[in-house]
Amino acid sequence: MKAIIVSDLHIGSRYFLYQDFKRFLGNISEDHELILNGDIIDNPNAKLKPSHQRTLDLIEQVSYRQKVVWVQGNHDNGCIPRGFGRVHFKHLHTIEHKLLITHGHDFDEIMPRNQAFIKAFKLMHDLRVKLGARPVHVANYAKKWEILYKVLRKNVMMNAVNCAMENGYEAVTCGHTHYPEDRIFNGIRYLNTGSWTEFPVFYLLVTAEEMALKKMDDSFGS
Ligand SMILES: [Mn+2]
């Protein structure tokens, strides 16, 4: 089975790189399963601008042609766009006993416990942008807070790895942290597919021979 996995598109967010994603979708071969690993929509209650709505429509079209799985994240949890093609909505997905696929918010013990802090953090970020700082997604801003960000990434990775190990998977892939990485921890491979709100963008390619985190322009011509 061949699959392509991406996460954290955040369709609807001003930072969603919709043109790049459109190009990416247009290049996926039909014999690959497309797996959208959470936070595909930024805010299910907000109306999408036409360019972002077109992205959703394209995903729907792809689902008539090949298998599309949408694994829910914390942003799009419970959000099922009405009459959305043949897309399969799931909480987690697996590829044989090779790979466990889940967004990763269930492994995050830091953010849900610190809502007040996160709210203050987001306000601070908004204010910076209003004062003229280069607008970036809030997760991108968080990366400047290195220690905090490292703790968050490590927490998600360790819990993901433990979960994979307990359930007999060789590898696990998540999104959520917006930080692409490919590591081995306690003998389990952990792959994070990053996000589509900042460059470079990544996708995970799974074939019978390999599992590889690829930068979009490695194989998709510009
Ligand atoms: Mn996200």
Image (spheres, rainbow, N blue to C red):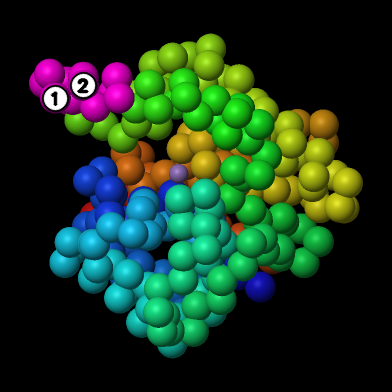
Residue 85 included in the magenta stretch of the image: no
Please tell me whether residue 192 is drawn above or below residue 44 in the rendered image.
Answer: above
* Mark 2 nearby-residue class (10 Å; few <14, some 14–19, many ≥20): few
Quarter occupied by residue 119? top left
Decide if residue 133 is on the left or right side of residue 204.
left
Residue furthest to the front = 116
Q: Amino acid at mark 2?
A: Leu
Q: Quadrant of residue 65?
A: bottom left
Chain part drawn in magenta: 123-134
x then y, percent, for residue 219: 39, 56
Residue at image mark 2: 127
Q: On the image, numbered disc 1 is attached to which residue? A: 130
Give the percent coordinates (x, y) of residue 185: 75, 31
Q: The N terminus lies in which quarter of the figure?
A: bottom right
Of the four image quadrants, the one with ligand 1 is top left
Which SS class for mark 1? helix
